[in-house]
Image: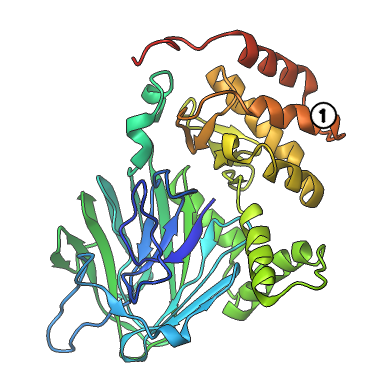
Amino acid sequence: MTRWVAQTHQNYVSVTPYNWTSTIVHGFQATRQPAIWMGENGPVVVVPGFTPKDQLKIKANFDERGLNMRKETETITPAYYSIVLDDGLRGEVLVEQSANSSRPSVLTSTPTNISFPHGTVAVHLRPGSSQVHEICGSNSERQDTIITPTSTLPHVEGFNGYYCARFDYTSSTTSHGTTQNSTTHPLSEWGEGALLAGYAVFEPWTVVDVRVGTSFISINQARANIDAEIPDGTSLEQTVQATKDAWTEKVDMFALEGASEVQQQVFWTGVAHALQYPSEQHEQGSYYSGYDGKIHPGESYTGYSIWDTYRAQWAFLILFAPERLPGMITSMLADYKQSGWLPMWKNIVETNIMVGTHADSLIAEAVVKGVQGFDTELAWEAVWKDATVPPKDDLTTS
């Protein structure tokens, strides 16, 4: 559901948050942008930084908060990312298998979330102390709103991405607060509106573990995702190993012979890309549906760029991730029940931007190749409607 990347750019449709050629990091972003031509949904950014001892200066503005990368220290794998920044500040990010939580390890943490266009932020202290325990909140950013079909637009007006960042550290916090539009509010524990951030300042050279839960359901669900995926007491090394083990299970299915170094790079990059999407949208057995704006039990997947992938990537998944196929097809059928149509280009919410009905091909290929575990009668009903019934206003631009 969530991918953690070093943020080098402010992403939008046609711009991704990370570019390998960049030399400045502006934070570590929880992104749901599945492709460069699609938009972001409810992002969260964890931003390490510095502030003078004698003068609190919180840099929430994107350009101001950038830190130079020591590019030679950068480590990039599908499971783990690490970089050394200005003055030896080190940031590490890793991604859980279901990608609802991650653990950036930073020396100081200044803004924890930037939310736009509208959001909330709350700083929660440890009971009976002034020490920061969590920074939680929400934001309603959904960049694909301009291409949401008219049939589902009313159901997603209340969309929010929720987050909760839980701090573990051995020293103490010396300050906390919120910022809005680059104005700092020391000791504030609540904010609402646009361009928000919550921050915590730590003693110099403190190692801080930040476990971040994200959700499309609620703040409490974001907390529950932390507890389920990276519970208290889980070390950074344990989380890295669990993530590596999940990838190893898949890459061990392949063996290359006679390939050059460049050919190996191309092949393994392709394998990693092919296993990225569709990605899980469900959270501990429930999910938010962008088709009716409700919470449902069961599995759900998103990131269906179907007209790009139906010829090859789907066949790849049938071969190398067959355990995922019943859930993915059941997810598409749930989308059909909730909206009246199979997905075309689902990015949390349907975007309906491609021609054709290529979900029909996915389901048909799965049936022909013996995939079971989904409602074939409902699948036939959905495929038949896709093929024979034009959507409302299909011949207009309204």
Query: Which residue is rendered at x = 52% and y = 34% of the image?
Result: 345
Residue ID at (67%, 75%): 241
- Residue type at mark 1 is Val
Q: Secondary structure at mark 1?
A: helix
| Vertical arrangement, residue 139 with respect to residue 70, above or below | above
Residue that appears at 39% across and 44% down: 39
**Residue 299 lies in quadrant:** top right
User: Is residue 286 toward the left or the right of residue 155 in the image?
Assistant: right
Residue 233 vs residue 248, the one in the foreground: 248
Q: Position of residue 38 (x, y in %)?
A: 42, 43
Is residue 157 something that shows in the picture? no
Classify residue 160 as left or right of residue 55: right
> How many neighbours does mark 1 have within 10 angstroms: few (below 14), some (14-19), or many (20 or more)?
some
- Position above or below: 352 against 261: above
The C terminus lies in quadrant: top left
Nearest to the observer: residue 63 or residue 160: 63
Relative image position of residue 221 (x, y in whole percent) = 50, 49
Residue, disc 1: 367
Question: Residue shown at 46%/50% (left/top)?
Answer: 32
